[in-house]
Image (tube, rainbow, N blue to C red):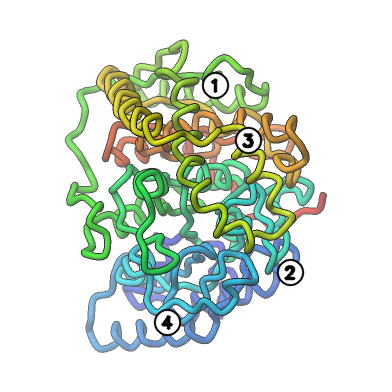
Amino acid sequence: MDNTLWQRTADELGAAVGSGELSAVEVVESHLARIAEVNPQVNAVTQAMAETARAEAAALDARRDAGERLGPLAGVPFTVKENIDVAGVPTTHGIARFRAFTARRDAPPVARLRAAGAVPVGHSNMPDLALGGVHSRSELFGDTRNPWDASRTPGGSSGGDGAAVASGMAPLGLGNDSGGSVRLPAAFCGVAGLKPSAGRFPSDHRMGPDDPSLASQLIPVDGPLARTVGDLRLAFEALAGTDPVDPRAVPVPPDGPAPRAPWRVAVVRDPGGQGVHPAVETAVSAAADALSDAGHAVEEIDDVPRLAETLEVYGRLIMTEFSLAWPHIGPVVPENSRAYIEMSMERAKPADLAEYLRLTGVWLGLRRSWAELMSRHELVLGPVFTEPPIEPGLESTGPEGFERVTRAMRLCSATSLVGLPAVSVPGAVVDGLPQGVQLIGPMYREDLCLTAAEAVERRTGVLTPISPAGG
């Protein structure tokens, strides 16, 4: 068996398995061996699915040998965040209370990736209940370490997927993002990540029989991580579409009409004028130069629309709904995660009914303001996080650390509220750490974000897979 298969892209692996050049079993075995080798250092994969992955791979090979044409991701391993259901496996959300909470069926994005031929090889770590901060540390599984530097966080809340993909444990990861939770790990781990438009991918985030309330219906989205933008595009095409489980998912084609050249790209270096680290500014400048060299019309703008107001609405809508659930959730949240949650509730005070209803109207106006910006520009380029990768748990150390982290992720929070798609891609490596940028597009124009991200990737290069480094 070729023990270097884990280094290859999802595109290469899917094509090779589909043609018979490689067997799906070989591909899965190579990645399981890589997990065994590096996961003890990185601690990204929480529950390996070795036996089921081997069985699925063997079934794929048998179908191909019988003459069946396999999907574009045939035999491609992927990891799945601990809050997304994989049939027959516990969906623990990282906490002891749900240790035996075995999923009865696949969540829609897992089912769609499987339909394209991909094979889940493990659940991946995240903060407790995805609420405990932006560092992937859970009660059940401990800390995930950034494979670039163990003294830096891999990000969160999809940090297990970011670290697993970066270190070669899988070519693809499946996470979710409601304010940067795919884009931050992508930026901190030197890989690519997609936050899709609201309604682009079907999902199911129920933790019981009841559906979530309004903000939790419209803000969180599931999204993929990959080492290359090309692989991210393959995952996007597999995940997009409708599903009766999720009536929010829209039947919009993956690719829209080509805009007239040159594309207009708005660059916002310092959203809200609250400061940006020179290393991050270097990455934004490099990405802007790459897009300019690719023939796009790059234009500096002062700011994105109504940022301070957007952040206030984002925080208050989410925390108003969350405060009603806190009496039920609070008792199961581990003590280590309570500090970040409680500071979040203190920062964004719950609204009464009249104020909550007013905020839903402001929300629509904010979306309109962003739509007006996107009518003048095909894309917006800006930072994912306005600082380099931070130390683990900074956001939970006290009010100063909390504010610093919340401020640094402000462009992610804003774009999550208004529902726009964004691709995080490395813009540079500074002082040995990757620095991510994001390309934000109009609703349902993930294709534009991906195409522009490929231009940035050609300049920066593909940075991973890497072997874990100390710190």
Identify the secondary structure beneath mark 2.
Answer: helix
> Does 54 appear above or below 176?
below
The secondary structure type at the circle numbered 4 is helix
Residue nearest the viewer, comparing 4 with 232 = 232
Q: Please tell me which of labels 1 and 3 falls first in the chain.
A: 1
| Numbered disc 3: secondary structure | helix
Q: Nearer the viewer, mark 1 or mark 3?
A: 3
User: What residue lies at 42% left-to-right and 18% top-to-bottom?
Assistant: 306
- Image point (63%, 66%), residue name: 95
Task: Determine which quarter of the picture holds residue 234.
Answer: bottom left
Q: Is residue 463 left or right of residue 304?
A: right
Q: Position of residue 267 (x, y in %)?
A: 45, 19
Q: Marks 3 and 4: CB-CB under 8 Å?
A: no
Gap between marks 2 and 1 measured at Cα: 37 Å
Q: Residues within 10 Å of mark 3 (few under 14, many from 20)?
A: few
Circle 3 or circle 2, nearest the eye? 3
Please name the amino acid that badge 1 sits on: Ser
Residue at the spot of label 4: 57
Q: Which residue is mark 3?
A: 346
- Number of other residues with Cα within 10 Å of mark 1, as a class: few under 14, some 14 to 19, many 20 or more: some
Question: In 3D space, how far apart are the residues under numbered discs 1 and 3 (Cα atoms)?
Answer: 36 Å
Q: Which residue is mark 2?
A: 40
* Label 4: few (<14), some (14–19) or many (≥20) C-alpha neighbours in 10 Å: many
Name the amino acid, label 4.
Ala
Judge by depth and name the residue closer to the eye, 241 or 69.
241
Q: Earlier in the sequence, mark 3 or mark 2?
A: 2
| Residue matched to label 1 | 285
